[in-house]
Amino acid sequence: MTAIDVDQARQAIGDLPAGTSHGETPSPEHVYLPRSHVRAMDPNTLLVTGMRGAGKTFWWSALQEGVVRQLVGGQRSALGENTEVRTGFGVRPLLDEYPNKDVLHSLIAGGFEPRTIWRAVHAWQLAPGDHPIRQHDTWRARTRYVAANAEATERLFQERDAELDRKGVYLLILCDALDRCADDWKEMYRTIRGLLQTAMELRSYRRLRVKVFLRSDQIDESRIGDFPDASKVLSSAVELSWPRHELYGLLWHCLANGRFGAEFRTFFQAGDWPAMTVAGRPVFSVPRSSIFREEYQREKFHALAGQWMGTDHRRGFPYTWIPNHLADTDGRVSPRSFLAALRTAADETTDRHSEHRHALHYDSIKRGVQAASKIRVSELQEDYPWVHRVLSPLRGMVVPCEFDEIAQRWKRKGVLHRLAEETEQNEVKLPPRHIDRLEEGVREDLETLRVFMHMRDGRVNIPDVFRVGYGLGRRGGVKPVE
């Protein structure tokens, strides 16, 4: 097997991208399209779902770039580089393009239906400079115009659709970060429902499309799916999944396009690497035949990380150990966590085990998982601040454990009663949906978020990716973060 220089490998792994959770534009060499994502990129896919860190904001940002659309279009996707793209909602505060959370709340409180608000957003994105809606400077005025001029708005959609059809291109309106559209579940569901309704309505045109990116936990069919043809939207949703072989496919892709890319492409010996010239430089694609050969992937990764997670096989094998310890209760791993663990492992190996014969030392891999756990915990706190309040009091416990032990600790500290009182006073952002049932209700919500696992014997377990960051123990597991 062709070897690769250990120092070069550490530097390359340390260069792995950190992701685009804040909407930064990704570099073309970091754009990897798993097979499960191909259909998600199709303009005719209206709803794309995924866990936090699965790539929703990555694709929302990436698809706004023509060079990325060119790259994706060349990788088995129906998306074309000439596709016109607009942003209808997202992580960036762009008030000239779409209303933010406070404006949405003001419009809904003022009596506008979410469907009408989103039609105003779409009309604004489609209207030429001389259209009457362009004479209005505020979202309230634009929404009022659409509400009062239903026929003119419909004609605008028809005319733009006909124009795009003559060109043979789609116009795609991207909507992401819908968790930021409201602070309470009721208003968020209403807002998402209205958006999906307009996405379905625009689907009747030939060239107008809305693509909505939602977190998996935001899909509640009883709340967002009670409009005509809602089942067509929900049943055709595509999930951004990351099976283990695609995580390593992503790693191969980043290394093959990094600063030692030529050396890694020789090291992988995967056959011909298809390349496209994007922004004046070649971007190589991983040969698909190599991605689905897990024995091949295992052999190559163990050449970088060693064969075992310790001095012998009893501690496990790096290829499977890393994804297993980064998974939630459904076995899902976010690529952001995966790459973060490897970046930290490379840096830690350089600092602590520079003479190690492999690029990654097994102890450094464990510290990489600790770092990834801290990132995952921070993301969870950002999405649902109440989770930190209910998990922090559990520090020092050892899982799996009886749920009564957890409930008793919550009761002793008065955690849930205070949380229930603040929820009733609307002081908690997106609070537990079943806080009215206290311990059992919060347990159900944590299971929905894939943080708690209900074991067959009734005990509760917590995956390492959350357990480590919150300071809980598990016999034989990765040590908690101090």
Image (tube, rainbow, N blue to C red):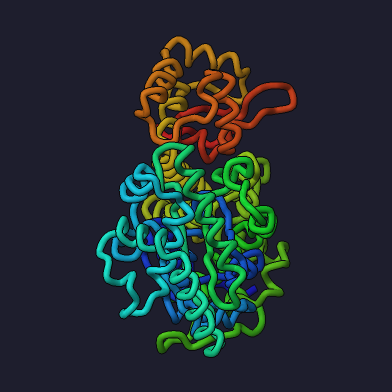
Q: Is residue 81 above or below residue 439?
A: below
Mark count:
0
Q: Is residue 477 visible?
A: yes
The percent coordinates of residue 81 (x first, y second) are: 50, 83
What residue is at 56 percent from the left and 35 percent from the top? 451
The percent coordinates of residue 267 (x first, y second) are: 58, 75
What residue is at 59 percent from the left and 38 percent from the top? 450
- Pick whichever, 352 or 459, lies toward us: 459
Quadrant position of the C terminus in the picture: top left
Instruction: Please indicate whether residue 447 sits to the left or right of residue 351 in the image.
Output: right
What residue is at 49 percent from the left and 30 percent from the top? 432
- Pick whichever, 67 or 233, lies toward us: 233
What residue is at 40 percent from the left and 49 percent from the top? 112
Q: Is residue 427 above or below residue 236?
A: above
- Pick whichever, 340 or 364, lies toward us: 340
Q: Is residue 363 visible?
A: no
Instruction: Please indicate whether residue 73 sits to the left or right of residue 313 in the image.
Output: left
Kindly give the residue lying farthest to the left in the view shown: 137
Quadrant position of the N terminus in the picture: bottom right
The percent coordinates of residue 63 (x first, y second) are: 47, 72
Identify the image quadrant of residue 440: top right
The percent coordinates of residue 356 (x first, y second) are: 48, 56
